[in-house]
Image (tube, rainbow, N blue to C red):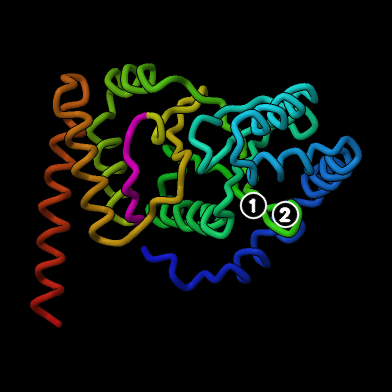
Amino acid sequence: MSLAPFSTESIISQYNYKNFARPSIASQIDTFLAICSSNKADHALSLLLQEEDPALQEKWKELLEGLGWKFIQFNDRSTIIVESPDLPNWLLKCSKMWEKNIRRCPAANKLRSVVNELELNHLFRIPDKMIMPLFEKYVVLAEKMSLISANATISKLGKREDLDIIAEQLCALIAKSGLADVHFENICMTTDGLLTVIDTDSLGETNAALLGLRTLVDLTKSIKALKLISLKAQQSIQDLEAQTRLCCVNV
């Protein structure tokens, strides 16, 4: 599942919150941006992304924390994840490499399309993602999900009576979407029992799908309760490799 056809310009047009969000949510974001402009939070966030000096980074971070902002991820400054009390239920995913960062939006949309195509809405909930402007650049707004921990996800999956069906559907999603970033911090469970994929910037094609399935085998083969997932992932790898060989023969 390649994302190559999506240019930066088309992503900005299609996934700008003014075009993507429901009117009520777009209005909330308008209000949020007005607040950020008034209290200079947008300026502080922009400078935080640009700054290389750790002392100045901390200065802008403390300014935002003083406004009630909470940093979810900051150690790896390639991506900063933060939430603001002025925009509840949404996370801001920000990066200096903003053109790459905004590709999360079409990737999330494609993953949601695969969920719909495979009729997996009873099992998966993919968060909405859109973009908003920040000083001539863009940040990603990601719907905030109510999640349980990775260990709790493993525990709950292992107790499911329909684990064989879940294993088959999970492998089908990985194979069809080309999801490579497979681990229980990324594929995790919501508090209402659905599975979700948090980070959607790793969709690819066959090689990515094979990587995702092999990672799933490695994750689950030593967990007795998830043995069915490991076995199904191994079978899916064999099936996908066979399809790939057949395609090469037919070319």
Give the CA distance from mark 1 to mark 2.
6 Å
Disc 1 marks a residue whose amino acid type is: Met
Residue at screen point 61% across, 36% down: 53
**Whole-percent x and y of residue 191?**
51, 22
Q: How many marks?
A: 2
User: Mark 1 = which residue?
Assistant: 130
Disc 2 marks a residue whose amino acid type is: Tyr
Q: Earlier in the sequence, mark 1 or mark 2?
A: 2
Query: What segment is highlighted magenta in the picture?
Result: 177-184
Above/below status of 82 relative to 34:
above
- Please tell me how crowded label 2 is: few (under 14), some (14-19), or many (20+) other residues with Cα within 10 Å: many
From the image, give the main secondary structure of the stretch colored magenta: loop
Instruction: Give left or right: position of 162 versus 120.
Output: left
User: Mark 2 = which residue?
Assistant: 17
Instruction: Give left or right: position of 156 versus 111.
Output: left
Q: Does 104 appear in magenta?
A: no
Q: Who is closer to the viewer here, 52 or 232?
A: 52
Q: Are marks 1 and 2 in contact (CB under 8 Å)?
A: yes
**Whole-percent x and y of residue 208?**
28, 55
Q: Using the rendered view, name the quadrant where residue 102 is placed.
A: bottom right
Above/below status of 122 relative to 106:
above
Above/below status of 111 relative to 56:
below
